[in-house]
Image (cartoon, grey):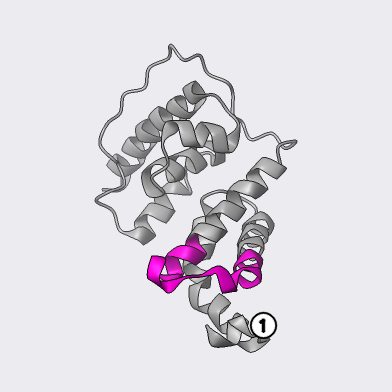
Amino acid sequence: MAGCRRRDRQSQEQLYRRFYPVLFALCKNFFDEKHDVLTALNNGMMKVFQNIDQYDATKGELFNWIYTAVRNAALTLLRDQKTKQFDYDEIDDRMGFESADNPLETLSASDIQIYLAQLPVATRRICGLFYLEGFSVKEISEALAISTGTVKWHLSESRMRLKKILEKYL
């Protein structure tokens, strides 16, 4: 930390490498293209290095602070790519959304990544934000600039598809 605060490149590289696998997996939930995954991860880490003096150990662990910065960078990149089509077809709010148990809670982290990768990218993003990151439907709607009905539809779709995937492999 002291080296990162002094803007020492070797210290920054060590910090980057230490958390790279987890942060890469996080960003992979949002993007299909490796370039986009790395862009989000690197944008987030740049924010970390630029604002390292603002980190306060009394308010939480370093990893959680970094994780939040990288997750926010991924969400920002999604919003910035608004011109790209993400297959978010607006859904009527009258369509059903049955909130079942979290289909991912009994799986290991590596299994979750494998199963989520089989979902369409838009559905995977929303599923990850809701079940893994703990965002509410409203927060996802605002972060991705889509209707709450669309978020609910993707959550329902993710549960239905994951159920089929899990039945096939388990």
Q: Residue at x 30, y 41 (%)?
A: 103
User: In the rendered view, does 57 fall on the left or right side of 105?
Assistant: right
Q: Is residue 50 visible?
A: yes
Residue 48 painted magenta: yes
Residue at position x 58%, y 72% from top?
52
Q: Magenta part of the protein: which range?
A: 45-67
Please name whichever residue, 104 or 48, is drawn nearer the observer in this view of the structure: 48
The residue located at (75%, 36%) in the rendering is 83
Image spot of residue 166 (x, y percent)? 31, 43
Please state the horizontal and vertical placement of residue 68, each as a whole percent of the image: 50, 58
Q: Position of residue 159 (x, y in %)?
A: 35, 34
Residue 60, can we see it?
A: no
Q: Which residue is mark 1?
A: 7
Q: Is residue 165 above or below residue 100?
A: below
Q: Main secondary structure of the magenta part?
A: helix
Residue 124 percent location from the top left of the image? 48, 42
Q: Quadrant of residue 97?
A: top left
Dot 1: within a 10 Å radius of its alpha carbon, few (fewer than 14), some, or many (20 or more) residues?
A: some
Q: Amino acid at mark 1?
A: Arg
Q: Residue furthest right?
A: 83
What secondary structure is found at the residue carrying circle 1? loop
Q: In the image, is residue 50 above or below residue 135?
A: below
